[in-house]
Amino acid sequence: MQGFQIEKLMKPNHVFQAKLMLILLTITISSTVSNFFLDYLFWSQRIPSFFQ
């Protein structure tokens, strides 16, 4: 996420808002990815019970 230069897209003197937006975006993406892997793990453990 640090590779993106969101500060260049924001208005001057709004660097704090850009960094805050980057933090919130990082939290959102990481939450989505972790939920995907947790759901994948849950459903992959449930597969044997479908075939009994």
Image (tube, rainbow, N blue to C red):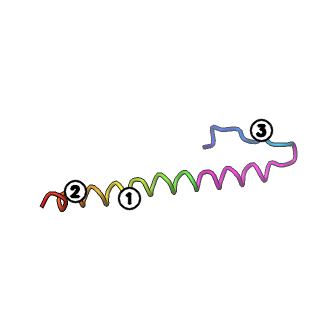
Amino acid under disc 2:
Ile
Image location (x, y in percent) of residue 37: 39, 54
In whole angstroms, how far apart are the C-alphas of marks 3 and 1? 34 Å
Is label 1 or label 2 in front? 2
Q: Is residue 25 left or right of residue 20?
A: left
Where 7 sits versus 28, above or below? above
Where 8 sits versus 47, above or below? above
Residue 47 tag number: 2
Amino acid under disc 1:
Leu
Residue corresponding to mark 1: 38
Q: Are marks 2 and 3 in contact (CB under 8 Å)?
A: no
Residue corresponding to mark 3: 9
Decide: few, some or many residues near mark 2? Use Cα within 10 Å; few <14, some 14-19, many ≥20.
few
Amino acid under disc 3:
Leu
Say whether disc 2 or disc 3 marks the residue closer to the N-terminus: 3
Q: Classify mark 2: helix, strand or loop.
A: helix
Image location (x, y in percent) of residue 32: 50, 54
Decide: few, some or many residues near mark 3? Use Cα within 10 Å; few <14, some 14-19, many ≥20.
few
